Amino acid sequence: MTELRGLYTLWLREVKRYLRNRTRIASSFFQPLLWLFIFGSGVRFSGTIGTLNYQEYIFPGIIGQTLLFTSMFMGISVIWDKEFGFMKEILVAPISRVSVFLGKMLGDSTDAVIQGITVFVMGLLIGIKLDIVMFFKILPVMLLITFGIVSIGLVIAFLIESLESFGVIQSFINLPLFFLSGALFPVSGPGVPDWLALASQVNPLTYGVDALRTIILGGAWSPLNPLYINLAVLCVFDVAMIIIGTLTFNKTK
């Protein structure tokens, strides 16, 4: 019971801290708008995307981008906790470090999913038919995407001490994951370089974006993999990163 109470408290703290930061919520709302409407409208895409226009094609990718950037950024909370001494108080609390890690991971994942839901609703603005069934199908996919990526951000934050270093390393990881995921352009098919196709296959976000497109676009999208394959890869990725994260946190002094 103590472990569950501690886990819940940490989850609630992360969610409340996110919801109270209106500036961060507003700024993270406008970035997807810029990508979707300015980039999506201004770029003439020459590849084959079937019957989809470019805005429809990149819409699931923008959701994936939002989940990626928000999830990775959440690791900065660990840096702040170290700076202000709150991390020391957590470490001496009568709960296991596994519960501490899971509490922060679940809280940060919830924050990222809230942001992803906000972008999901934007689909109405570009004519995508959204319904409650689609929402409940896409919600677990968004959670699976965030679990692993939040864990990456937390691992980075556990290992470094400064905000500047976190920002540099975060960008170094975020950008390749984003651009090699197929969020903005196809990563398979005629004309796609072999190295790009190979790199996308080892990128976990590729499977998340493909799953999002499969659910949101339906028959208008020819998926790279069956949905169950995408979900299985995400589950394996999440388990691996959570294990790495808990092991890293256990070594934190």
Image (cartoon, rainbow, N blue to C red):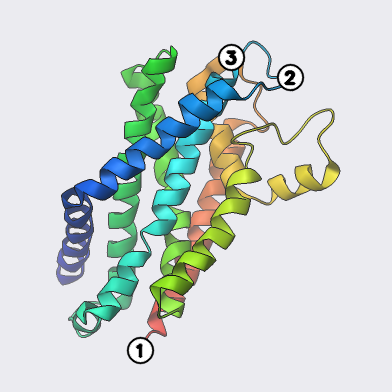
Question: Camera-side residue: 42 or 189?
Answer: 42
Q: Looking at the picture, does residue 223 appear above or below residue 159?
A: above
Which of the two discs, 3 and 1, sits closer to the camera? 1
What mark, if any, has residue 54 been given in the picture?
none
Q: Is residue 92 left or right of residue 116?
A: left
Question: Camera-side residue: 134 or 54?
Answer: 54
Q: Is mark 2 on a helix, strand or loop?
A: loop
Location of residue 231 in the rendering, given as x and y in whole percent from the top left corner: 53, 41
**Alpha-carbon distance for marks 3 and 1?**
51 Å
What mark, if any, has residue 253 been given in the picture?
1
Check disc 2 and report the residue beneath it. Answer: 48
Q: Which of marks 3 and 1 is nearer the N terminus?
A: 3
Location of residue 121 in the rendering, given as x and y in whole percent from the top left corner: 34, 25
Q: Earlier in the sequence, mark 2 or mark 1?
A: 2
Q: What residue type is labelled 2?
A: Thr
**Alpha-carbon distance for marks 3 and 2?**
15 Å
Check disc 3 and report the residue beneath it. Answer: 219
